[in-house]
Amino acid sequence: MSSSISAETAIAGPQSLWRRFSWGGALTALGLLALVGTATADETASANGPTVVPLLDATTHGDGVPLAYPSGKPEVTARLIEIKPGVETNHHRHPVPLFAYILEGELTLHDERGGIRKVKAGDAFMESSDWHFGRNEGSETVRLLAVYLGEQGTPLSVQKPD
């Protein structure tokens, strides 16, 4: 029997989890954003410089909808999310662009049209803007870094009404 977590729980996580990873997650997110932001035509390492590993270049959400930046006051939010084996999120969507990077495990994403996509450790992707849910069908906890490119006052996730 699988248990379920709400999109709010998946995004916000337990307070203790957030405190445990707040600095580490924030620094990791900033580091990843810095690396992605510095990826240029010269993506090779110099003898004295950093190694840059491009993770993702995207102009659309995972479902092909073009990305649109907010018109209000911008806000970048980074969260470390853990999904234990057998757990799934509720059906939800994100009204803001969401970049995700799988740190550990494998997650199965289900969209509203019946599409299924598996993402595993090392995969970077833009989340769908349409209704979807994720399920950990594996035997290890999924850990993912989620970076939301939103605006103040806009929810990061919206739960699908019944």
Image (tube, helix red, strand yellow):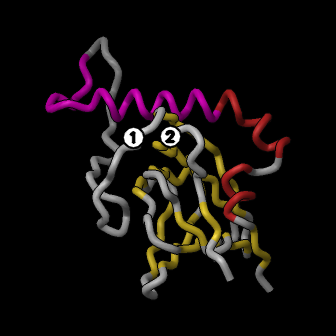
Q: Nearer the viewer, residue 152 or 116?
A: 152
Q: Which residues are magenta?
A: 25-46
Residue that lies at the very extreme toward the right in this rendered image: 16
Q: Are marks 2 and 1 in contact (CB under 8 Å)?
A: yes
Residue that lies at the very extreme toward the front in this rendered image: 72
Q: Residues within 10 Å of mark 1 (few under 14, many from 20)?
A: few
Spot occupied by residue 153 in the image (x, y as percentages of width and height): 59, 42
Instruction: Determine if the magenta segment contains residue 15.
Output: no
Which residue in the structure is indicated by mark 2?
151
Location of residue 4 with respect to 152 vertically, above or below: below
Of the image marks 2 and 1, the number of the one nearer the N terminus: 1
Spot occupied by residue 84 in the image (x, y as percentages of width and height): 74, 64
Q: Residues within 10 Å of mark 2 (few under 14, many from 20)?
A: some
Three-letter residue code for mark 1 = Ser
Location of residue 122 with respect to 2 vertically, above or below: above
Which residue in the structure is indicated by mark 1?
71
Residue at screen point 52% across, 59% down? 94
- Horizontal side, residue 45 vs residue 31: left or right: left
Say which quadrant the C terminus sits in.
bottom right
Magenta residues: mostly which secondary structure?
Answer: helix
Instruction: Determine if the magenta segment contains residue 33.
Output: yes
Three-letter residue code for mark 2 = Glu
Residue at screen point 45% across, 60% down? 127
- Horizontal side, residue 28 vs residue 19: left or right: left
Q: Nearer the viewer, mark 2 or mark 1?
A: 1
